[in-house]
Image: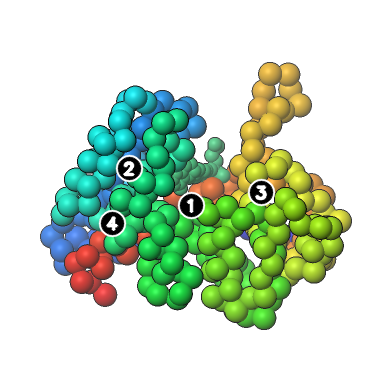
Amino acid sequence: MADIIDGKAFAAALRESIADGVADFVAKAGRKPGLAVVLVGEDAASQVYVRNKHKATIAAGMESFEYRLAADTSQAELLALVEALNADPAVDGILVQLPLPNGLDENAVIQTIDPDKDVDGFTTTSTGRLLTGLPGFVACTPLGCLMLLKDRLGDLSGKSAVVIGRSNIVGKPMAQLLLRESCTVTIAHSRTADLPAVVRGADIVVAAVGRPEMVKGDWLKPGATVIDVGINRVPAAEEGKTKLVGDVDFASASEVAGAITPVPGGVGPMTIACLLYNTLEAANRREGIA
Ligand SMILES: Nc1nc(=O)c2c([nH]1)NC[C@@H]1CN(c3ccc(C(=O)N[C@@H](CCC(=O)O)C(=O)O)cc3)C=[N+]21
């Protein structure tokens, strides 16, 4: 049976150490690090995430600035808000919750964020910095996955890694991070031929495709480390109820893997902890604190 990688516990410990870093920052800078979160529209899941981010930000000793805008907010209004946050000295990090309502140009909004406040790591400046090895912000979900992998495996160099999924937010930056750690990286996706065979060659499997329980135990190399990024809500056994499952079939995968992250309680909590990590980093850089 695989070891369970407890992302929830790791994230809690990380948030504790960030809180210590925040106290140091306050002592040196005479102010709190500030995170601005912008939510446009009424999407129920987004509301939950934004509330959780707000609570975690306050608990870490940071300032949380929340902007809740109506679904019919115009592109110009949203861009004006981002520009105001770029110019606001109390704001170190800016996150615009995605997806935006129809009619708003997500890319134009993201690219307006000052890269030095881009704690989501979504601007092309941030992704380009990652690609070329320059210091910058890395997207929170892949960063959290990498922290779990390094905690479990130590040095990753020379390991074979398969990332299933090629999104800009998870798959592509995850592959870049693993390459930076000197893994041999394969990016698999919906057109990959014989995906089970590709996965079977990997010491590290990161599943980020958004298909419930797609990756089966018999696809895995025995002892592989499996990071499940999927968060899929599916019908539960009990009539009318739902449950969360990952992109990995946990029951069969945990028979073969060496270690595996659960859903929930794996990668999800790391995403929020890494947002705080990036925000503290942004604050320290802006104030010239090492
Ligand atoms: N600009 C932007 N940045 C984001 O980082 C971003 C976003 N937009 N839009 C939405 C997604 C989703 N996301 C999650 C964060 C934490 C959990 C999380 O903590 N999940 C818990 C369970 C949550 C539950 O029970 O529903 C877990 O996996 O244990 C999940 C999902 C950040 N996102």
Mark 2: amino acid: Val
Which element type, helix, strand or loop, lies under badge 3? loop
Position in image of residue 196 (x %, y %):
83, 58
Front disc: 1 or 2: 2
Q: Are marks 1 and 2 in contact (CB under 8 Å)?
A: no
> How packed is label 2: few (under 14 Cα within 10 Å), some, or many (20 or more)?
some
Q: Which tag, 3 or 1, sits closer to the chain's start?
A: 3
Mark 1, ligand 1, within 8 Å: the answer is: yes
Q: How far apart are labels 1 and 4 at the CA level?
A: 21 Å
Residue that badge 1 annotates:
271
> How packed is label 1: few (under 14 Cα within 10 Å), some, or many (20 or more)?
many
Give the camera-side residue of 71 and 35.
Answer: 71
> How packed is label 3: few (under 14 Cα within 10 Å), some, or many (20 or more)?
many
Label at residue 209: 3
Q: Which tag, 2 or 3, sits closer to the chain's start?
A: 2
Front disc: 3 or 1: 3
